[in-house]
Amino acid sequence: MSFSEPISIRQLSANDLTLMEGLLITFGEAFDEVDTYSSSRPSNAYLKRLLNSDYFIALAALKNGSVVGGIAAYELQKFEQERSEIYIYDLAVAAAHRREGIATALIQELKKIAVARAAYVIFVQADIGDDPAIALYTKLGVREDVLHFDIAVPVGDEHA
């Protein structure tokens, strides 16, 4: 592990569009899905609304002002009890900065936000074969084996 440069974790707001852009670039490169994160980039107005919402959480890990990792998460309000849970949708660290504790630091910061929002759990999915992610989440949480299904939504068919 190399801690030569200090890291800071910042929760992004509607005023942090440049950092959000850096986060999108970092996700695209880290997941080897640059096209997914750049070809249909949301407008600044959309990103401002998202970052200003009470359900979306974006954290950026910064070194010398540059984004080197981050989390995109959603707070889900529950209906069966007055509580919420936080879903980590994306978590990535740039390849050059892995094994420095950045992902753990991001999750620790998200835990503080979860406490402040009275969330009772943070949950995340990991793909089979993504051994580094599975090792990280195993270290920090309890594993549940579940099945995930994507249900397609017909485009342009309002009554389906």
Image (cartoon, rainbow, N blue to C red):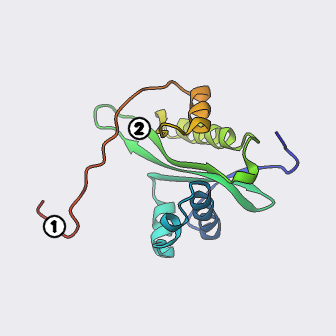
Residue 80 in the image: state x and y as whole percent.
28, 32
* Residue at the front extreme of this rendering: 129
**Which residue does the image show at 48% across and 25% down from the upper left?**
143
Task: Identify residue for label 1.
Answer: 157
Residue 98 placement, left or right of 115 = right
* Residue at the right extreme of this rendering: 4
Residue 94 placement, left or right of 17 = right
**Which residue does the image show at 49% across and 39% down from the upper left?**
126
Residue 25 in the image: state x and y as whole percent.
61, 64
Residue 106 in the image: state x and y as whole percent.
65, 44
Judged from the image, the secondary structure of the residue bearing numbered disc 2 is strand
Residue 136 in the image: state x and y as whole percent.
62, 33
The label number, if any, that marks residue 6 in the structure image: none
Of labels 1 and 2, the one closer to you:
1
**What amino acid is found at the position of numbered circle 1 in the picture?**
Asp
Can you say whether 109 is above or below 31 in the image? Answer: above
Task: Identify residue for label 2.
Answer: 84
